[in-house]
Amino acid sequence: MLNWDIQDVRRYKDKPFEFKETLDLTKELQSRTDEVLDSTPVEVNGQLFNDNGLVISNVKLSTVLTVPSTRSLSPVELPLKVQINEAYNIDNVETDELEDSTVIIQVDDDNPTINVYESIVDNILLSIPSKVLTKKEEEENIMPSGKDWSVISEDEFNKESEEEHVNPEFAKLKGLFDDDADKE
């Protein structure tokens, strides 16, 4: 499943090797992280290009993950569309001329296969943002709270810290000279 022997890919010298799959990766994603509560089937559409010792992959995938809100842990549906471009070095060619953004994967001589499946799973997990909020949390800026505690934003914290820095003893002296200014 989305894992091809190099010899099969080499046969496609003049045209791209195209593939289209629908994968149920829910269990795989859940086994790798607690962040995934559920997943719709992953629609995968891709091509492999054989290019002088490199196999270039161009893979597009889409799915909807259900992940917990980073604020309240409420389930949030997160639509994902990911494009993966990688180069598999199958003939140990020099890769200095490729763009720095291109991921180059050295294919092991002991296991001469191109594993797009593993790349898909990895890229889905890497695409989960570090901040996920429900629509209500985004619109109303709702922060969690409980008995004798509440979460505040960084701005609120900084504002409270500034207010607390005023020494109460100096605050008493603040208006001390105001009476003298009125007498003059």
Image (tube, helix red, strand yellow):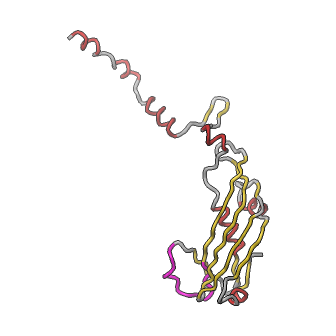
User: Which of the 4 quarters of the picture holds residue 112?
Assistant: bottom right
User: Which of the 4 quarters of the picture holds residue 4?
Assistant: bottom right
Residue 88: within the magenta? yes
Q: Position of residue 163 (x, y in %)?
A: 44, 29
Q: Is residue 136 above or below residue 120?
A: above
Task: Residue at 63% x, 85% y: name it.
Answer: 50
Task: Residue at 64% x, 64% y: name it.
Answer: 82
In the image: residue 42, left or right of residue 132: right
In the image: residue 30, left or right of residue 151: right
Q: Position of residue 146 (x, y in %)?
A: 67, 32
Task: Residue at 59% x, 89% y: name it.
Answer: 52
Q: Position of residue 140 (x, y in %)?
A: 61, 37
Give the magenta-colored segment's residue range. Answer: 87-100
In the image: residue 1, left or right of residue 154: right
Q: Position of residue 108 (x, y in %)?
A: 66, 83
For this rendering, which residue is in front, 164 or 4? 4
Residue 177: within the magenta? no
Q: Is residue 155 above or below residue 42?
A: above
Q: Is residue 67 above or below residue 101?
A: above
Q: Is residue 87 above or below residue 76?
A: below
